[in-house]
Amino acid sequence: MVSEPMSEKPAYPHSRTEEVQEVLTGVTFPDPYRWLEGNTDEVKTWQRAQAALASAYVRDWPHYERVRALVAKYSTERFTTLPQFAAGRWFRTQLVKGGRHAQAIVSDRPLGSGRTVFDPTTLNATHPPYLCWIAPSPDGRILAVGVCSNGSENNSICLIEVDTGKALSNPPSQTLMDNWTGGVQWLADSKGFFFSAIHGKAVDFAQQVFFHSLGAEGTSAPVKVKWTAETDYRMVVVSADGRYAVATERVTNTIPVAIAEIGRGPLRWRPFITTLEGSVVGHVVSDRYIAVTNVGAKRGRVVAISLDAENPNNPADWQELLPESDSTLRTITPVAGVLYLTEFVETYSRVRILSDDGHVLGTVPLPGRGAVGEYPFQLINLAQKTHPSQYLFSFSSFISSAGIFSHSLERAELQELKAPEVQLADAVVEDCWAQSADGTRVPYHLVRPTQLASPRPHPTLIYAYGAFNLPLLPQFPGSMAAFVAAGGVFVHAHLRGGAEFGLDWWEGGRLKNKQNCYDDLYAVADHLVAQDRATPERLAVTGHSAGGLSAAVAAMQRPRLWKAVVPRVPVLDLIGNCRDPYNWMATVLDRANISEEDEVRRLATFSPYHMVRDGLSYPAVYLDAGETDPRSPAWHARKFAARMQAVMPDGPPVLVHVWENVGHGWATDKVTATTQATDWLAFIMLQLGMTD
């Protein structure tokens, strides 16, 4: 069923303007809402009034509570946390039933009932911090945990005695940026660990790797490695046999920049891969570094590099174990003398098993067509802990949430450790292709209720990303499954700029080719309309982070194509965004070379804040942001909302909700995350005229 959207126009809080200009590489841009970048009482009052308006608008809808019930049912972890093995016991995080926070559990089985080792309420009973990560020492005696008190993902380390639950008095004092480097990386003898921390503000992104000793004084000392990049992610991981420390750098094109032997006095770092632009991502296995690389193979190949190589930067000296093929290689995990290799085949996951000389020994029998639950960047996956004799992984599909599985070469069948929690009943998946403006075929997956079989327009929501060499996995859509359960069609689109088809796919949607990313999105929407699957009056688009930028660009470049647009935790002022080091890095990686005037002007052509024009009609917009977000600061959403409200005072609604004590989404408690998702999904359903 459908109903007409609410006709009452929201009364927006006043947003003053000021005569301010932003100058980037000699190019000047007006910035009338610069004051909304501040943290003043005036800004806080404005922000709270806007949040109250947004909440009232969606929560007055008669179907809001039904949507909330669906969101609560289908909301699952964005990235499934796997249990970790140490000294015969298993450690994991577990959400307190009906609560906001998770606890750290130790058990004799991967997912057994176990015992609570750490509960964040011991630090703050009223507002417990978010448990970002856990890392047990190899001897199982100490559990390192990361806790975040404000939703930003910036976290501090606590060290807990596993048998007593007591906190050690001398943890590191530094602040970690997030959980991307695995929290801490223990030495095999459990006497200390490496960790990556930041200096100053998170947006300054000044990273340093430290080693923390568990001696009586508990000291932390900087690790003296010659890094290749001034500003980027970096970490030190320890080889599975405990013999080597590997200094690793760069979040997109990850490389092992230096290697040191452990246990022979002070670490002596020797350079390894330092001059290559491509990625070399893997593990030390015996006396070789075995890795997936895109050097000489745009979709990836597996190579082995001798640790004693005279010139490890020379690909001609590498041994190729598995050549490039039509599949896109992702990560390699050594387990019990073999290598588990994850890859994409037409966007879906496959896992093959290789011998250490590259022979294919078999394929893991996955539960269906879907995605192995890897993290988006290869560097993050490299930081995860592995089991010595089992390959542990999570797997989900568009209609089934993630289960946890175990596989070994000796056991032909999968062992299911945890069954999927929810299924999207009576839904089907269709694999489709659109054609972009330059002729490139763009894949997308359509998830619809089974009964919507007739080829006529239905309420449709497109979700996309397309940036940073990051794949949009064909996995369970979590809270967005509520849209399908409510009778809508969910579309999962793979845009250029991502990693689904290797280096060409990334390069085809970044820097001077960035417009291709947005053209791919329009191609998917136009294909749906041409196939009579959707109409602009019943079509919405959303995205998270860089996907939020894509959604906002779509509202500006093709405003008549959409009924509703929801950018979530987006960056929207791409010119002012270059002022802080973190987002400067993101800009030069993905969008433009801002040292050139022509590139700055091109950047402005897809900077939503600068694209808003008086007199034009735009779709309904709901902006969702976090006040403590260091990646996409909330002022982007504030400034864009003010500009849009000014040009459309009597048009479709433009709402902005900046959530307090919420960041980019990786450290948001369950209750708040459910409310966030309910609000923006209810906004879309309301605009598309959906009822129960």
Image (cartoon, rainbow, N blue to C red):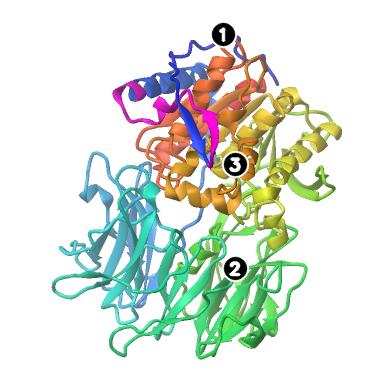
Q: Identify the residue shown where x is 56% and y is 21%.
A: 644
In this rendering, position of residue 49 left or right of residue 573: left
Q: Please name the amino acid that badge 3 sits on.
A: Val
Amino acid type of disc 1?
Glu
Which residue: 57% across, 85% down?
A: 305
The residue wearing badge 3 is 600
Which quadrant, please, contains the N terminus? top right
Determine the CA span between mark 3 and mark 2.
24 Å
The image shows residue 221 at horizontal and vertical percentages of: 25, 70
Instruction: Give the amino acid type for the residue marked by disc 2 in the picture.
Output: Glu
**Residue 321 is covered by the magenta coloring:** no
Q: Is residue 608 visible?
A: yes
Is 28 contained in the magenta span? yes
Q: Secondary structure at mark 1?
A: loop
Give residue 571's position: percent from left, percent from top: 52, 38
Mark 1, residue position: 8
Q: Secondary structure at mark 3?
A: helix
* Residue ranking furthest to the front: 26
Q: CA distance from mark 1 to mark 2?
A: 54 Å
The residue identified by callout 2 is 277
- Can you say whether 605 is above or below 622 in the image? below
The disc, 3 or 2, on the residue closer to the chain's N-terminal end is 2
Query: Over which residues does the magenta segment extend?
Result: 25-43
Could you classify mark 3 by the number of other residues whose Cα lies within 10 Å: few (under 14), some (14-19), or many (20 or more)?
Answer: many
The crowding category of the residue bearing disc 1, from other C-alpha atoms within 10 Å (few below 14, some 14 to 19, many at least 20), is: few
Where does the image place residue 358, in percent across and percent down from the top left? 67, 84
Quadrant of the frame with the C terminus: top right
Residue 345, compared with residue 95, is above or below; it is: below
